Image (tube, coloured by chain):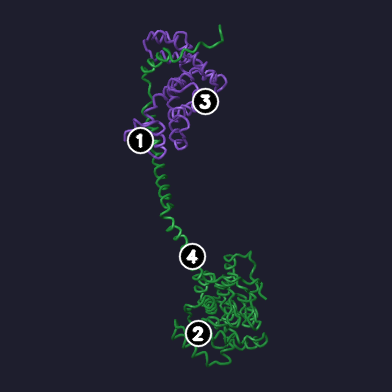
């Protein structure tokens, strides 16, 4: 059956009743967005793979509990963010104090800390995607998180505020700073 | 540097630059991750499908159009359980208050009692060492014979009317499974019990009955009767299989006949040590007297059934 025209909420409701095809359609529709949100926030492909499974397992398990009081995307990205936060906390709990400071930086953050690397180095390689990653890595985590939620999840400022448990104004401010910085870092690719 | 955020410029070229660059990013989740996610979701969906099917079936069962049939079926079941089924169950009467101590479990009680009882079994009834029986070969020979009725009343019966024994035995042997056999057994037990009058008298007669010819064995095959009758007959005849079957069916173990004799009394009168052991282990009242006031212990003493006397005393018989 063609699920392309069905809304996310309809698909998740159908999956909750046992329609595995609805889940597949839902997964294909949001796979890349969740993946980019996780990978660009964590800066680690391996961690993003683990989180990707955890997020979608949680979606499959809790599908029956989903109520369309909020958009499916909001629910989905809330799950993704919660899993990401848990992963960061768990990772920190298993590390020494010295390692915490080290691990708190993502791979990309460590890469950008290298004076020989950075957006310019990426630009020299004419790799726009790599430049984007590097640019995102240079954003403060809260700004990067808010920006990725809005751009990948197509969420409003209010929805981002709800997910991140921050005030509307705080999120709005973070988004402004993030955009300004991103514009600067990607100016060469305008 | 100003701490104020930059002015909001909407989803301007920054978003556009992000999307263009993001579209060029080839990074994707691995195929293994995708497969794991989809397989996991499919398994959960299959479980939900089964659960939903059961739920639909239940809801269909509870649908209004099936509700009368469901209620009718349940009502019929309740009717069968409450009204009809008890008619097929044997009535359970309350036990006497003078039973063996409850702390002694049936299994534990049977084990020690059966040990001497096995030595007294008809097939190989060797007398217990150190008993009067072992000292008296004549008595030992007497004990070898198969038996049904009580030794003392039987001896009394033989002594007072020796001619009765032969015809009775012959009739019983001819009709082993006949109902007449059972009737005869009952009559004999009644006659035996009637002779249990007093200790002195019984002691005197018992001493003279030692050499009397034993009554032949009467095979017992209790016909279908009311449970208490069958229980008493099985006890009197020492038919342990029938006795255990009756006890397992939950009948009144202390049910009495017209002369007030319980199964234990009849087993005692019949000299059936094994049956006595089984009955005591199942909680028979060891002191239940008949209408004449004779208790099983008195009957056992009169008959000099030492194994039975010992068992009865062990269970607190008076």
B147 up-or-down from A82: above or below: below
* Disc 3 crowd, CA 10 A, few/some/many (<14, 14-19, 20+): some
Give the label, 4 or 2, closer to the camera: 4
Q: Residue furthest top?
A: B1
**Chain B colour as displayed:** green
Q: Residue at x 64, y 82 (%)?
A: B291
The residue under label 3 is A162
Badge 4 or badge 2: first in the primary sequence: 4
Relative depth, front residue between B224 and B191: B224
Rendering coords of residue A118 (x, y %): 44, 10
Residue at the outermost front position: B64
Given this view, does label 2 or label 3 mark the residue nearer the observer? 3
Q: Is residue A154 above or below residue B146?
A: above
- Label 3: chain letter: A
Q: Residues within 10 Å of mark 2 (few under 14, many from 20)?
A: some
Which residue is label 2 attached to? Answer: B183
Is residue A59 or residue B201 the one in the foreground? A59
């Amino acid at each position: 059956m063609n699920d392309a025209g069905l809304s996310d909420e309809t698909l998740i409701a159908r999956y909750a009743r046992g329609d595995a095809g609805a889940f597949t359609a839902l997964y294909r529709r949001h796979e890349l967005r969740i993946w980019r949100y996780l990978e660009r926030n964590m800066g680690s492909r391996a961690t993003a793979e683990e989180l990707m499974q955890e997020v979608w397992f949680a979606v499959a398990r809790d599908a029956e509990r989903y109520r369309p009081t909020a958009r499916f995307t909001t629910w989905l990205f809330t799950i993704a963010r919660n899993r990401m936060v848990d992963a960061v906390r768990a990772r920190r709990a298993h590390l020494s104090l010295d390692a915490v400071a080290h691990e708190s930086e993502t791979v990309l953050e460590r890469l950008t800390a290298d004076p020989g690397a950075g957006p310019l180095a990426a630009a020299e390689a004419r790799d726009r995607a790599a430049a984007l990653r590097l640019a995102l890595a240079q954003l403060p985590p809260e700004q990067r998180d808010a920006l990725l939620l809005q751009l990948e999840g197509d969420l409003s400022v209010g929805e981002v505020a709800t997910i991140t448990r921050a005030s509307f104004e705080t999120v709005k401010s973070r988004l402004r700073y993030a955009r300004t910085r991103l514009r600067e870092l990607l100016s060469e690719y305008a | 540097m100003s701490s104020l955020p930059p002015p909001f410029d909407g989803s301007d070229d920054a978003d556009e630059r992000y999307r263009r660059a993001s579209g060029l990013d080839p990074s994707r989740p691995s195929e293994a991750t995708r497969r794991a996610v989809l397989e996991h979701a499919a398994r959960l969906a299959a479980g939900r499908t089964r659960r939903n099917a059961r739920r639909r079936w239940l809801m269909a069962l509870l649908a209004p159009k099936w509700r009368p049939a469901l209620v009718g079926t349940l009502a019929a079941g309740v009717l069968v359980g409450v009204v009809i089924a008890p008619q097929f169950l044997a009535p359970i009467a309350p036990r006497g208050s003078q039973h063996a101590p409850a702390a002694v479990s049936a299994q534990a009680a049977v084990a020690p009692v059966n040990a001497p009882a096995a030595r007294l079994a008809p097939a190989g009834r060797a007398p217990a060492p150190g008993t009067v029986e072992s000292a008296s070969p004549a008595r030992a020979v007497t004990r070898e014979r198969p038996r049904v009725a009580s030794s003392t009343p039987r001896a009394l019966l033989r002594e007072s009317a020796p001619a009765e024994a032969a015809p009775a035995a012959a009739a019983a042997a001819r009709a082993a499974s006949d109902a007449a056999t059972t009737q005869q057994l009952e009559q004999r037990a009644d006659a035996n019990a009637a002779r249990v009058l007093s200790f002195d008298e019984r002691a005197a007669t018992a001493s003279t009955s030692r050499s009397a010819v034993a009554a032949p064995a009467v095979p017992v095959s209790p016909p279908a009767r009311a449970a208490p009758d069958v229980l008493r007959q099985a006890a009197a005849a020492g038919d342990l299989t029938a006795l255990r079957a009756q006890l397992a069916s939950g009948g009144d173990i202390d049910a009495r006949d017209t002369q007030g004799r319980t199964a234990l009394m009849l087993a005692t009168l019949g000299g059936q040590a094994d049956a006595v052991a089984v009955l005591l282990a199942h909680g028979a009242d060891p002191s239940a007297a008949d209408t004449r006031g004779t208790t099983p212990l008195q009957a056992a003493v009169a008959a000099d059934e030492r194994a039975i006397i010992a068992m009865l005393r062990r269970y607190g018989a008076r």
